[in-house]
């Protein structure tokens, strides 16, 4: 759904447990006013787009219980307002990016 980038004034998007499948389009990075993104409990997979790191207003990011693979993008370390991040129950591989140490407001991080 590349048209998602046209929703540039949206501040909250909760599509959890909606049986969504496929990958997250890179246009998601155009949602720079978004504070809350919850996509948990779907059938989403593939690599997380690095453009997620452009969502500068994001405070909560939930990708748990999907089928994401690869590594967590280092660009997420640019999300200075991020307080909650849940990547649990996916198929991520590799080490956590050192850039996540830039997230000084982060108070909850789940990665299994």
Image (tube, helix red, strand yellow):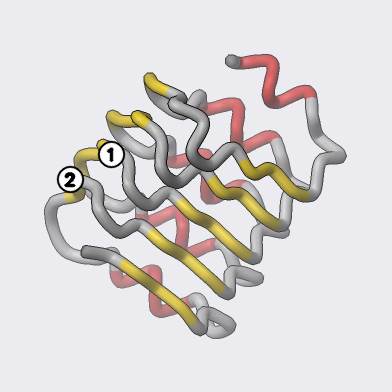
State the SS at label 2: strand
- Residue 73 vs 47, above or below: the answer is below
Could you tell me residue 3's position as x and y percent? 69, 15
Q: Quadrant of the N terminus?
A: top right
- Residue 25 vs 29, above or below: the answer is above
Q: Which is nearer the eye, 38 or 106?
A: 38
- Residue 38 vs 102, above or below: the answer is above
State the SS at label 1: strand
Disc assigned to residue 27: none
Disc assigned to residue 68: 1
Toward the right, the furthest residue is 9
Q: Earlier in the sequence, mark 1 or mark 2?
A: 1
| Residue lying at 50% horizontally and 24% vertically, measured from the top left | 25
| Residue lying at 81% horizontally and 41% vertically, measured from the top left | 10
Q: Which is nearer the eye, 96 or 11?
A: 11
Asked if disc 1 and disc 2 are in contact, CB closer than 8 Å, the reply is yes
Label 1 Cα neighbours within 10 Å, binned few <14 / some 14-19 / many ≥20: many
Could you tell me residue 76's position as x and y percent? 46, 57
Query: Mark 2 sits on what residue?
Result: 91
């Amino acid at each position: 759904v590349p048209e998602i980038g046209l929703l540039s004034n949206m501040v909250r998007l909760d599509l959890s447990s909606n049986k969504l499948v496929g990958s997250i389009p890179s246009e998601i990075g155009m949602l720079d006013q978004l504070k809350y993104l919850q996509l948990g409990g779907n059938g989403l997979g593939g690599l997380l787009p690095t453009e997620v790191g452009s969502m500068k207003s994001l405070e909560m990011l939930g990708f748990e219980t999907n089928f994401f693979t690869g590594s967590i993008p280092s660009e997420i370390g640019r999300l200075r307002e991020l307080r909650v991040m849940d990547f649990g129950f996916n198929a991520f591989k590799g080490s956590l990016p050192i850039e996540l140490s830039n997230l000084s407001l982060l108070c909850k991080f789940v990665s299994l």
